[in-house]
Image (cartoon, rainbow, N blue to C red):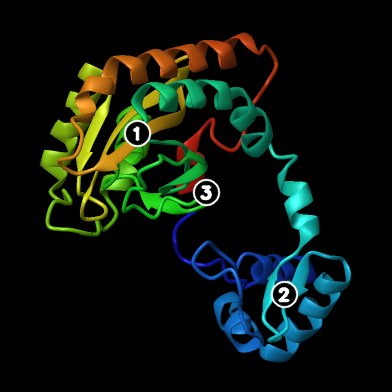
Amino acid sequence: MSDEPYKSSAKSVTARALAVLAAFDVDTPLLSLSQLARKAGLPVATVYRLAGELEDGRFLDRDSAGRYGLGVRLWEMGLLTPIHGRLRETAMPFLLNLQYECRETVQLAVCDGTNAIYIEKLTSEISVPVQSRIGARIPLHASGVGKALLAFSSEDFTEAILALPLTQYTPETVTDRRLLLRQLAQIRQRGFSLSHQEYQRGASSLAAPVMVNGTVQAAIGIVSYELRTDLVQYAPALLGVASRLAQRLQDAAGVAYPSIKDPIRSAE
């Protein structure tokens, strides 16, 4: 899934309702009726009717200003998803141990379509200047966790990502495809990625993939102020945590993570 909002071109009620729900994201959690209609790509009258029905079912809520937001029923359903539940629950002790050792902000991310998405974050006592809220989407080519996911994804998926426009977020963002391929090869060789101010100025990140049965399932990242900490010193601890988490997930026989098992499927 890309950063572009889902817009319905179908006539079914289901497709239109999904377009309304998909209009909300981390950056726009509250929308007026006109904003909601514009993002969903539907007439205002249609959105007004659908929003009323979704509100009745607690899938949407409205604040005192009349703006719509996702409702508690969706939150309850979200807790049942494999990523939110099993993966986060399994990873939490490992993330806590890593943060205790490095005293920096620790993140857990998965691949979703053409982006990485944060599904967990443990904030350091010293906040970092990176907007890494849970649920936020970040580019694969310009972030530590993104590059860790990309480097260990399939060749077809990597080629599909590099064929897309590579946005330059800062002067340090790598947009040259040949250079990016060399960086990905280096990441595979040493087992971790290192990103300096590529997505947002003032921050560095160190990240490693969580490999389960040869497939990248997630990435764990450590984020710190640029120049404040030499993150490479935490590479052994990070690699150890990623390896132990991967083993724990692998030992959980029969547990599947369909949303993150085959990222190339989402990019097509």
Identify the mark at residue 104; answer none if there is no mark. Answer: none
Looking at the rendered structure, the kind of residue marked 2 is Lys
Circle 1 residue:
222
Label 1 CA crowd tier, 10 Å (few <14, some 14–19, many 20+): many
**Cα–Cα gap, marks 3 and 1:** 15 Å
The residue positioned 67% from the left and 81% from the top of the image is 67
Foreground pick, 230 / 134: 230
For numbered disc 1, what is the local secondary structure?
strand
Circle 2 residue:
11
Asked if marks 3 and 2 touch (Cβ < 8 Å), the reply is: no
The residue positioned 35% from the left and 21% from the top of the image is 238
Q: Is residue 253 left or right of residue 27?
A: right
Q: Nearer the viewer, mark 2 or mark 1?
A: 1
Circle 3 residue:
134
Q: Is residue 41 left or right of residue 116?
A: right
The residue positioned 28% from the left and 22% from the top of the image is 234
As drawn, 143 above or below 7:
above
Foreground pick, 105 / 214: 105
Asked if marks 3 and 1 touch (Cβ < 8 Å), the reply is: no
